[in-house]
Image (cartoon, grey):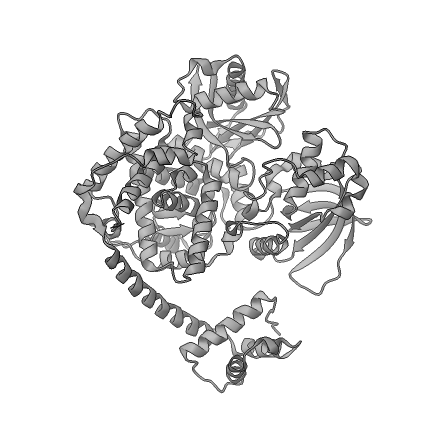
Amino acid sequence: MITLEEFHQDFLQSILSDSESRGLLKAQSFFELVCEDLMQVGDLTNEYAMAEFIKTGSEVYGYDYDENRKIFTLINFQFFQNDEIETLTKQHVNIKFNRLKKFAELCMEGLYSDLEETSDAYSLAFNIHRFMQNNLVDKFRLLVLTDGKLTKSISQIPNDLISDTVCEHQIIDINYLYSIFMSENSSGSYDIELNIPYIKVISSSSEYQSYLGIMDGEQLFEIYDEFGQKLLEQNVRTFLQFRGGVNKGIRNTIQYKPDMFFAYNNGITATATQVETRDGFITKITDFQIVNGGQTTSAIYAAKKNSKLDISKVSIQMKLSVVNNIDKKSEFVSSVSQYANTQNKVNKSDFFSNSPFHKEMKDYSKRIWVATRGGSQKRTHWFYERVRGEYLNEQAYLTPAKKKQFQIENPKNQLIEKTFLAKSENSWDRKPHIVSKGAQYNFEEFANSVTDMLEKNHLAITENYFRDAVAKVILFRETEKIVSKATWYENAFRAQTVAYSIALLSHIIYKKNLFFNFNRVWDDQRLPIELLDIMKIITKEVYERITNPPPGAANIAQWCKKESCWNDVNRIDIDLEPIKKMFKNKEEVKYEQKSEKQLKELDNGIEIQAFVIQTNIEEWIQLYGYYMTNNNYKSLTITQRDILKKYSEGRISFPSEKQSKVLYNLFQKAVKEGWEVVYS
């Protein structure tokens, strides 16, 4: 198991690698990495943003606004960046929180009028002032992030007031970040205590145990009010953002016929890893996740929060499934979520975590070596991390020698996170306004695009796709460095400038009906000098354009989220003559794609044959028995039945590629239907 100290060392290495590869300050990398983790577990919304302001007695580094719960979060940090875990003292805590409070007070007094409109801090100060004027803040939350460990002398920090508004305090230290890592890579994260009647559902499944329960509106309100988006299954969190108006039908039932709510509403479907019961009541739920019922939860919460309706007479049915195998927790929750969400429209991206895309990318990342360069004799991989913490988790049980070898072959600066990949891909796909909307919106768009692509061509993720994807990541990182080092850059809107600059390069090439040859970037693992020079020109032009929005437009950050901003930027014309040797024509691309498809078909055929041969014969016997019972054989063609029967009886010693494909598909079909091998 990974220890806290090992996690801390890996965390610091992640920050160092991220800052060096992207040209960021270590403090910026620290802020982004921690906030991404907090967003993934629901502690922050996908609207969080960086906004630095430092003045005598006041300090802030970022913010977040939970529109549904009317909670405004101000973020500061204490970044020690030492090899040993430092202690965050009481003095540190008091200073950081007092400076955040002072900043909030200055904002209410009209601080924004003294700031440059092109700064991130202006948007933050203006929003606080406007939200407070319009009674849109019910609570302030002051958040201090640190790579240290909170002193044991602080066990609780009492709530305070900022201009008569409740203010609560929270410290995210290395222990908290470690617990996030452990919960994502093992089990357990938080408990919910409650008291609801239940019926235990009798089932023969060894995978889970189900319960039917009934909770009232107040209980559901209190749970969401305390835990927020932590309750929402991660894959559908964007789908259940609680945006827009409250469903009128549900609201009307709450207001006029609360006693009929149970009859009219489908309730919620949830999962957990453990429950405790006593005298016919569920008293505690561990890792509670709502996988269906977002509209119900939203309507009930908003009915009390916004409309001040009485929800105590509302009864909600709850179907709760508790997974027995903790190792399969993520897969189980995602599957329940997918099959439970049938009555509402759900985006393809909501279940992207189960996409074959990740397996393909992971396989290529393990198989493809990067050419040695700069005199180095060590060949390396780009490590694709589908789930945060995979890189560290894969080293958990390695010997010191094996761990060192792993780190040499998979250097930290060659780690690709799926959310970063989504940024580089969508930027090149000419969607900078989507990238500017934030990580979750951007990832949703990327997931939808990949899903559509795989539906049209299941062989789309090839070795060339992987190499090009890595090259785009390199392009994105190098462009970040260019912006950060530029004399014209004023420490604001770097992310938007980078996304729009890459999109503009892609757009100009696209208009010429040409294709960019990423092979040179892959081969050299860096941008050619002539491309660096072009990007310096593009980034300056883009920065000047986006930081001067048209009259009447919203602030710059909001302007960059609009397609009209992209339509304005893509009219910029740049001479690409210096990099004309890096273009390919349509015929070249078609030939490469055909060759890649043939190669991948061959690879898939070999992999399938290997799977069939390596699977124990006992499993094929049980599979044949599964299809021969309960009329399952009727779903098979005569050819399928014949091949399965002969192979299970040992009459086919070495199946051909076509026979293997038939057997493989039957095996996967049965697994999806719930078939399991029974081991004696």
Along the horizontal axis of the image, is 204 left or right of 335? right
Image position of 671 with respect to 260: above or below: below
Let me know if residue 312 appears in the view: no
Residue drawn at point x = 46 percent, y = 23 percent: 123
The quarter of the image holding the C terminus is bottom right
Q: Nearer the viewer, residue 364 or 535?
A: 535
Along the horizontal axis of the image, is 431 left or right of 647? left
Residue drawn at point x = 62 percent, y = 55 percent: 336
Q: Quadrant of the rendered structure where residue 626 is?
A: bottom right
Coordinates of residue 452 in the picture (x, y in percent): 45, 55
Image position of 288 with respect to 594: above or below: above
User: As drawn, which residue projects farthest toward the bottom?
Assistant: 651
Residue drawn at point x = 42 percent, y = 56 percent: 453
Coordinates of residue 323 in the picture (x, y in percent): 64, 55
Coordinates of residue 305 in the picture (x, y in percent): 68, 30
Q: How many marks?
A: 0
Image position of 671 with respect to 534: above or below: below
Let me know if residue 590 appears in the view: yes
Coordinates of residue 225 in the picture (x, y in percent): 66, 34
Along the horizontal axis of the image, is 310 left or right of 84? right
Q: Nearer the viewer, residue 503 or 525?
A: 503
